[in-house]
Amino acid sequence: MTDNLITLPARPAARARRRAVPVPAADTHLYLDGVTVSFDGFKALNELSLVINKGELRTIIGPNGAGKTTMMDVITGKTRPDKGDVFFAGKYDLTRLDEAAIATLGIGRKFQRPTVFQNLTVFDNLELALKSARGAWRVLFAEVTRNQRQAVERTLATVGLSDRAATIAGTLSHGQKQWLEIGMLLMQDAQLLLLDEPVAGMTDHETEATAALLLSIAGERTVVVVEHDMEFVRRLGARITVLHEGSVLAEGSLEHVQSDPKVIEVYLGR
Amino acid sequence: MTAIAGLLDRRGWAAFLLVGVVLVVAVPLLNLLPAMGSALRVPDYLVPLFGKYACYALLALSLDLVWGYAGILSLGHGAFFALGGYAMGMYLMRQIGTRGVYGNAVLPDFMVFLNWKELPWYWYGFDHFAFAALMVLLVPGILAFAFGWFAFRSRVTGVYLSIITQALTYALLLAFFRNDMGFGGNNGLTDFKDVLGFEIQAPATRRGLYVASVIALGLGFLLCRWIVQSKLGRLLLALRDAENRVRFLGYRVENAKLLAFTVSAVLAGIAGALYVPQVGIINPSEFSPANSIEIAIWVAVGGRGNLVGALVGAVLVNVAKTYFTGAAPEFWLFFLGAIFVVVTLFFPKGLTGLVGQWRNRRRAHAPRAVEAAGDD
């Protein structure tokens, strides 16, 4: 992610021929329709359409290069699609907003490699994530109120890091960093959590705890998990979307997608 | 009041006040009271030299705020310093009045020499100290704001940002070299007579300027301390280490950087304004890219991301420079290069980092001390 030292903000594609705003069902939380992103002719996303309901837990799997990370980039405003619609909560056109605005709407993202603020304490990591005024000037004068402190402490308990509040985040174990980052999304009060490989590098025990945590979050919030670990996917027991070459290959329960000949071919055919 | 008291801990305040009293009271008194030739006497030539160090320390502090905390390595901070210096220099030029070589009441000497008939509009107002003081803050501040607005919004970071800050100061260097810019060209502004009605060369004025520099340094230190201890300070550290994470939490990274960068440029401008009356000249060489790189070396030597480190680094390197350029001028640049290489390779956290390491080692050997709880 830091490979590019200069990342110019993408220019919104020509909007002259905008289609009419779609009217998704009332409980649709995230709506992608015909989203295409190409990099130098390579189509990272190819007419991707996906609907995720409010409170749903959805797992997204797919081989490398299937477009999982690009899809997250599009939803969070990092990449502008060449064409297609992306709507959040039925009314917000995510293709027109930048990362900060999208995050403020309540979309939280956990990166593939756990990304926390290495030189700050666990407490300060969560406190920065806490939903509050985001303007630079307001932040300069901000003081941590007692309510905020309590909110941080609740989240510390939720992600099992209560006894690590004063620890410098850089010294946490890999699994603890993953939890801390999930905790940051909770502090941000994200209504839609996009989690890129949340159990990568975790022990079996930690994986189990993470599954329990995500299951407890889902329902109240919408959770989209991108994962390779099939044992973890099984444990989540959620509806699964299989991506392949930038579009949806199959969707359904784990049994359903596992018995789908197209999926078998993609995973085993080469 | 409690907010100010909370900026430093008890020992920190004790050290701050002790150093402050020594610098503000003891040095001028030792310049004034002991008899000439007494070992205790601070000679007259040292007073403006100390004042110069204080200005450099303030400049280092301003760079540390953006480099050490926000990860913005500006290699053009000398430009803001020089602009503050030019604003002050213009005021000092206007104070010369008819005492110039040509005795022209309206035009500074260099304009008479260039056959200019009237004062350019941008020199208006510099007869008044208050106006000049305002420009000392505004000119570097506005330039930094405009520059940062475009650079941070376009998400220019890392080496690329450093390169364009170098380009910025180089462009200003070339511009100020030109005679028709109206800032004295190659020679810059010099031959100052008075500041605020006091004779600029008089020992008493020099003491006053020195004390003003030390006080500005102290206030600048407290301001930076306040910023880095605020939530914005934590945000700056956070975006230094993981800019994308900050952005996806909903913060506009560019605005936080812009605020820090602008404050930093204003501090650099103040340092430049206090520097010019003490050295008696400001010319385009202050814009030279090498100058700006040297500031980064001071901060690296002292320890970036540590405000005291920046101060210590600036003073130590400049004391060494004063010594070397007197004793063995041809070796100074080799020495400067060598300490930069040694510090980056062996003490990436600078001298203050070294002290911290040594302290930790002692603490580790000491019988299990109370674990420092991060209760800010």
Image (spheres, rainbow, N blue to C red):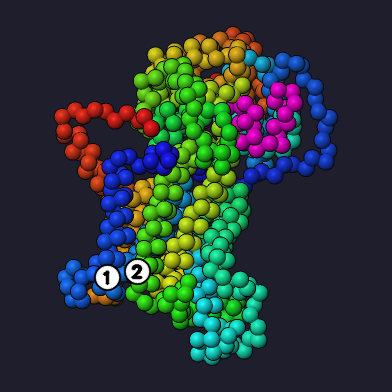
Of B359 and B112, the residue lying toward us: B112
Counting from the top left corner in percent of width and height, residue B96 is at 51, 81
Structural crowding at the residue carrying mark 1, measured as other residues with C-alpha within 10 Å and reported as few (<14), some (14–19) or many (≥20): some
Which stretch appears magenta? Answer: A87-112
Name which residue type carries label 2.
Arg
A270 in relation to B87, above or below: above
Q: Please give the residue where the numbered disc 2 appears in the rendered image.
A: B207
Of B52 and A112, the residue lying toward us: B52
- Relative placement, left or right, of A52 versus B369 is right
Counting from the top left corner in percent of width and height, residue B286 is at 46, 70
Name the residue rendered at 62%, 31% in the picture: A104
Q: Is residue B185 visible?
A: no
Name the residue rendered at 77%, 20% in the picture: A24
Q: Which mark is residue B95?
A: none
Name which residue type carries label 1.
Leu
Q: Quadrant of residue A82?
A: top right
Q: Secondary structure at mark 2?
A: helix
Q: Is residue A239 visible?
A: yes
Q: Are marks 2 and 1 in contact (CB under 8 Å)?
A: yes
State which chain disc 1 sits on: B
Q: Which mark is residue B32?
A: 1
Judge whether residue A101 is colored magenta: yes
A120 in relation to B345, above or below: above
Counting from the top left corner in percent of width and height, residue A177 is at 42, 27
Structural crowding at the residue carrying mark 2, measured as other residues with C-alpha within 10 Å and reported as few (<14), some (14–19) or many (≥20): many
